[in-house]
Image (cartoon, rainbow, N blue to C red):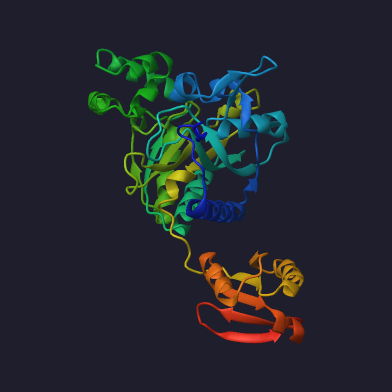
Amino acid sequence: MSNIQSLRGMKDILDKNSELFTYFIDNASKIASRYGFSYLETPILEETALFKRSVGESSDIVGKEMYQFIDKGENDVCLRPEGTAGVVRMFVQNKLDRAGGTRKYFYHGPMFRYERPQKGRLREFHQFGCESFGESNVYEDANIILMISEILSFFKIEYNLQLNSLGCKECMPSYKENLVKHLEGLSLCSDCDRRVLTNPIRVLDCKNDSCQNELKDAPKITNSLCSICDTDFEKLKVILDKNNITYEVDSNLVRGLDYYTKTAFEFVSTNIGAQSAIAGGGRYDRLVEFLGGRETSAIGFAIGIERLLELIIKNETKEEVLYIGAMSEDAIDTVFTKVSQKRKELKVITDYKVRGFGKHLNNAQKLGATTVALVGENEIKDNTIWIKKLETKEEQTISLDEF
């Protein structure tokens, strides 16, 4: 009988990767909290209609990639392919759109898309994201971009920022009309032929080289912005310049989801191969309304965590890890008590087996301890504990009470 393996495109996170994963979550969460965002968790399973109405029927996610099925209650459901739609559903369901004011949330967790697995692209992947509701000022767009920059800089991850404006309901219709006229007669892939009929702006997002070659003379949306969108986009660039954020305007950047309006952005790494986008997002001022709520300004982003793991450089400050071991049977109870007490102060690891001095030291080093504390027959008799700092080699014996 063969062993059961993990499903294709789904990987265990363990050892060094699990250490980096939790390191990222912990510190990204701290930075988001400093920016006024509070933690939110939404269900992994949602109604399929949520993503069809938000992400859009024209998107590859809805058209090809969702883990969709009918459950035992005859409900059409799917595993969430992205995080924003569920947060907006929560926002409307809890009538926060009617309460007014601003609301800011961050989340992290698994997302699912049935696509061809490759480096940097899995079928189960994890995202860290933030969503901000109720603030229409372009300073909030800048605030979001600055926060992502701070998160990536904390982990010493280099990036290029790509920026665009997708316009609003006032200027987008005429641009789409001009774009469709331009696309007529071009030799595009079958996916783009479909997009022309459903959401033509998505054609600009095609990754097919032949399509990109055909689109090189396509009209630029930044040349069709209304006065409000144009003023906001210019203001955003001024704010980023003043805060020393380098960017490149990419007029073909539309993101892969239908709900974006105005500001759209991607943070791109040059160090991870073809799947180079490590964070992205933008403004979606009409999505709350699309999902049955009152019109509410909103902007957000998501970071793909797996893509960052090989790029993260941990802070060199080493965490203090204490190893406590027993060298005699009568020391085990004392060791267990001391382990429980010291865990209120720092990370403590132990071994319930009685081991000799040398084996305890080897064990402690393998487990990444910075300090070893051992109790044997002599220590029990004298009510003491032997301690060694592994980096400095400093040793001392102190009373158990002092310890």
Question: Is 241 or 90 nearer to us in this picture?
Answer: 90
Residue at figure coordinates x 37%, y 34% from the top left: 253
Residue at figure coordinates x 62%, y 44% from the top left: 104
Picture coordinates of residue 117, whole percent (x, y): 41, 33
Question: Is 223 or 285 nearer to us in this picture?
Answer: 285
Q: Quadrant of the C terminus?
A: bottom right
Picture coordinates of residue 293, whole percent (x, y): 66, 26
Question: Is 387 or 133 nearer to us in this picture?
Answer: 387
Residue at figure coordinates x 54%, y 64% from the top left: 367
Q: Locate residue 64 relative to residue 319 in the image: left or right.
A: left
From this view, report whether residue 378 is shown above or below residue 203: below
Q: Quadrant of residue 398?
A: bottom right
Q: Quadrant of residue 252?
A: top left
Q: Locate residue 16 relative to residue 84 in the image: left or right.
A: left
Is any part of residue 369 visible from this angle?
no
Is any part of residue 113 visible from this angle?
yes
- Could you tell me how many numbered marks the image carries? 0
Q: Quadrant of residue 330?
A: bottom right
Picture coordinates of residue 56, whole percent (x, y): 50, 22
From this view, report whether residue 308 is shown above or below residue 361: above
Q: Locate residue 140 relative to residue 265 in the image: left or right.
A: right
Picture coordinates of residue 47, whole percent (x, y): 63, 22
